[in-house]
Image: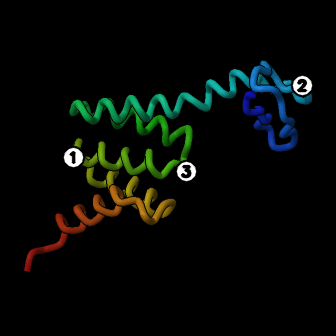
Amino acid sequence: MSTPVVCPVPRCRTAHEASADSCRRCGTPLRAYARLGAHPARLFNEGLAAARRGAFAAARDRFAAVVLWCPHDAEARSALGLACYELGDADEARRQWEQAVARRPQDRTARDGLALLAAATDPVT
């Protein structure tokens, strides 16, 4: 048995069979919407692969696209911060990590990144 698909339009929210092409109530193209929803995940995975091979500019671009589409995605923001840091853009890394921690306080990557930046700017006594 397939999981039902719910129309993403807030005023509609009609349930459909998983194979439905469009919403029978409002006409929203359900298959296209499902493909659109999968795009940020694909971009995020491409960003991870790029970062693993040291292609941080490509990783940054993929993570930035995910953040553009999904501004509340703390994991993508944290990864974007790390890519920016690796490219020498500490200001942008800080901005992304601060936003990631604001959305997900337990984000270890963002918290560690902010601590690293703080240690780099604190004068040694």
Vertical relation: 83 (above or below) 90: above
Residue type, mark 1 in image: Gly
Question: Where in the figure is residue 9, as x and y percent of width and height?
Answer: 80, 38
Q: Which residue is mark 1?
A: 88
- Label 3 secondary element: loop
Residue type, mark 3 in image: His
Nearest-to-viewer mark from 1 and 3: 3
Would you say 98 lies left or right of 90 here? right
For the C terminus, give its image quadrant.
bottom left
Vertical relation: 115 (above or below) 50: below
- Label 1 secondary element: loop
Q: Which residue is mark 3?
A: 72
Quadrant assignment, res 83: top left
Vertical relation: 57 (above or below) 96: above
Q: Residue furthest bottom?
A: 125
Question: How far apart are the alpha carbons under marks 2 and 3?
Answer: 30 Å
Q: What crowding class fits label 3: few (fewer than 14 Cα within 10 Å), some (14-19), or many (20 or more)?
A: some
- Residue 24, which numbered label? 2
Q: Residue at x 43, y 35 (%)?
A: 44
User: Of label 1 and label 3, which has the lower sequence position?
Assistant: 3
User: Of label 2 and label 1, which has the lower sequence position?
Assistant: 2
- Label 2 secondary element: loop
Question: How far apart are the alpha carbons under marks 1 and 3?
Answer: 24 Å
Question: Where in the figure is residue 52, as x and y percent of width and height?
Answer: 25, 34
Nearest-to-viewer mark from 2 and 3: 2
